[in-house]
């Protein structure tokens, strides 16, 4: 009987994102960059437009594939290694 190793995927939307976190960017199938790729958190968006807190905050992530900083929603990120 073969044992199949299961890898636990951490897609924790409640994670307190911090600069230096290593993440995997997961984009929807319709997006031009539909494949997942690694990135690193540069900073978090905490802007309050019109005095309101955003329901889905955006996180600035340096994308290793495109070599540029992208604003990405937290639900499109998977934590690989948190910054210590």
Image (tube, rainbow, N blue to C red):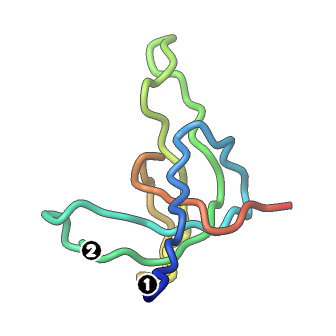
Q: For residue 33, which numbered disc appears in the image? A: 2
Answer yes or no: do the residues labelled 2 and 1 have beta carbons within 8 Å?
yes
Quadrant in the rendering for residue 31: bottom left
Query: Dot 2: within a 10 Å radius of its alpha carbon, few (fewer than 14), some, or many (20 or more) residues?
Result: some
N-term-proximal mark, 2 vs 1 = 2
Q: Is residue 74 above or below residue 3?
A: above
Looking at the figure, which quarter contains the C terminus?
A: bottom right
Element assignment for label 1: loop
Based on the displayed image, in which of its 4 quarters is residue 30 positioned?
Answer: bottom left
Q: Is residue 20 left or right of residue 60?
A: right
Residue in the image at 43% along x and 88% along y: 1
Q: Foreground: 12 or 74?
A: 12
Q: Residue at x 40, y 54 (%)?
A: 76
Q: Residue at x 30, y 63 (%)?
A: 27
Q: Position of residue 78 (x, y in %)?
A: 51, 59
Residue under pointer 1: 65
Q: Position of residue 48 (x, y in %)?
A: 53, 22
Q: Is residue 24 above or below residue 4?
A: above
């Amino acid at each position: 009987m073969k044992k199949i190793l299961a890898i636990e995927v951490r897609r924790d939307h409640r994670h307190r994102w911090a600069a230096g976190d290593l993440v995997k960017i997961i984009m929807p199938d319709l997006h031009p960059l539909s494949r997942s790729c690694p990135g690193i958190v540069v900073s978090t968006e905490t802007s309050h437009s019109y005095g309101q807190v955003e329901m889905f905050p955006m996180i600035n992530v340096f994308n290793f594939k495109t070599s540029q900083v992208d604003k990405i929603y937290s639900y499109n990120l998977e934590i690989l290694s948190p910054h210590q």
